[in-house]
Amino acid sequence: MKKNMLITGGSGFIGSFLSEELLKRGYSVCAVDNLSTGKLENIAHLKKDPDFELVTGTIMNKDLMDDLVARAETVFHLAAAVGVRLIIERPVETIETNILGTEIIYKLVNKHKKKVIITSTSEIYGKNNEIPFKENADSVYGPTTKSRWSYACSKAIDEFLGIAYHHEKKLPLVIVRLFNTIGPRQTGAYGMVVPTFVQQALLRHPITVFGDGEQTRCFANVKDVVWAIAELAETPDAIGEVYNIGTTELISIKDLAASVKRLCNSNSEIIKVPYDKAYETGFEDMYQRKPDISKIQKLIGYEPKINLEKTIEEIIDYFKT
Ligand code: UDP
């Protein structure tokens, strides 16, 4: 019998690639997803694989999750409310899914003594401007009246609780902080910049750069990211630790817009949209975001293999077909 890996959020963008990676490594995969932001088409190609199973349901359903966790060897907890737009539009859902949902997972993995990989986020560092961010850097958040920070805080609570379970109850856990991750199957519907720009450029619509466009990000290819997640799960020394996963190739959003336009052979106009109009009044963006990946490099030899240009090309192909 193959070892069973449970992925919450398994039909989401990252979950679908992680499913492929784990199947490739010889495991059976059970993906549980409530299909709120995950899509059936993301995993349609896996459905004929006898080692892959999709369970449609929510992580809030304790009885369902109890059964699935009991069957699993390791749980990869990816289910979360994602995307800046969704977080601003539906803050109650974001906070409840991220905190209550993760609490249910911790209780169950602890009950069944299963290993858990928690996917956290680079939002944890907030508006700390001292890049690159090392895992032990400070978190710098804005006031509670600005809903954007609720996402970072909800994920920080998930991390605190996980580390507490590890120390107090010896729960085998690994926390990964994902930086901007992109690739085919990612939707622009929740505000993610790269699929949004690609769709705008292909449709010859204006490319909407928010703010002055000088803000920077590092965009990793999802295949590099899921390789790192799977590898950490197989590495006993990762237990009890927090790892950044991302790439160090830094680009401003203004330059990203120009690259996407060029790679799409588009004549779209590049326009600037003030943050107040793009999100909500008083919206605060992260000005800079870049990971220090020396910790994960040292442990598993992680080296991002697919650069930004190649990744944008993959995304263009995806939207064209
Ligand atoms: N952004 C933009 N135009 C868009 C969508 C996003 O200029 O249509 C900017 C956004 O303000 C941020 C960056 O692109 O500075 C990355 O946004 P995304 O939501 O993809 O990820 P974040 O890093 O904010 O989590």
Image (cartoon, rainbow, N blue to C red):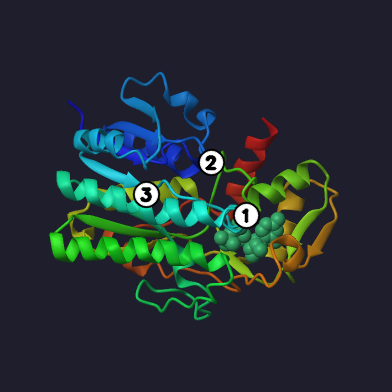
Which amino acid type corresponds to the residue marked 2 in the rendered image? Thr
Which amino acid type corresponds to the residue marked 3 in the rendered image? Gly
| Label tally | 3
For the question of whether residue 228 can be seen, the reply is no
Query: Is residue 109 found left or right of 245 in the rendered image?
Result: left
Q: Judge by depth and name the residue closer to the eye, 73 or 45.
A: 73
Q: Judge by depth and name the residue closer to the eye, 112 or 286.
A: 112
Q: Judge by depth and name the residue closer to the eye, 181 or 71.
A: 71
Q: Secondary structure at mark 3?
A: helix
For the question of whether residue 18 can be seen, the reply is yes
- Give x and y (percent) for residue 99: 39, 56
For label 1, the residue is: 89
For label 2, the residue is: 37
Residue at 31%, 32% in the rendered image: 29
Considering only order in the chain, which callout, 3 or 2, is on the residue closer to the N terminus?
Answer: 2
Rounded to the nearest whole Å, what is the CA distance between mark 2 and mark 3? 15 Å
Q: Quadrant of the C terminus?
A: top right
Q: Quadrant of the N terminus?
A: top left
Considering only order in the chain, which callout, 3 or 1, is on the residue closer to the N terminus?
Answer: 1
Quarter holding ligand 1: bottom right
Residue at 71%, 52% in the rendered image: 260
Which amino acid type corresponds to the residue marked 1 in the rendered image? Glu
Residue at 62%, 54% in the rendered image: 89
For label 3, the residue is: 101
| Residues at circles 2 and 3 in contact by the CB criterion of under 8 Å | no
Rounded to the nearest whole Å, what is the CA distance between mark 2 and mark 1? 14 Å
For the residue carrying disc 3, how many other residues have a C-alpha within 10 Å: few (<14), some (14-19), or many (20+)? Answer: many
Q: Is residue 186 above or below residue 118?
A: above
- Give x and y (percent) for residue 197: 71, 51
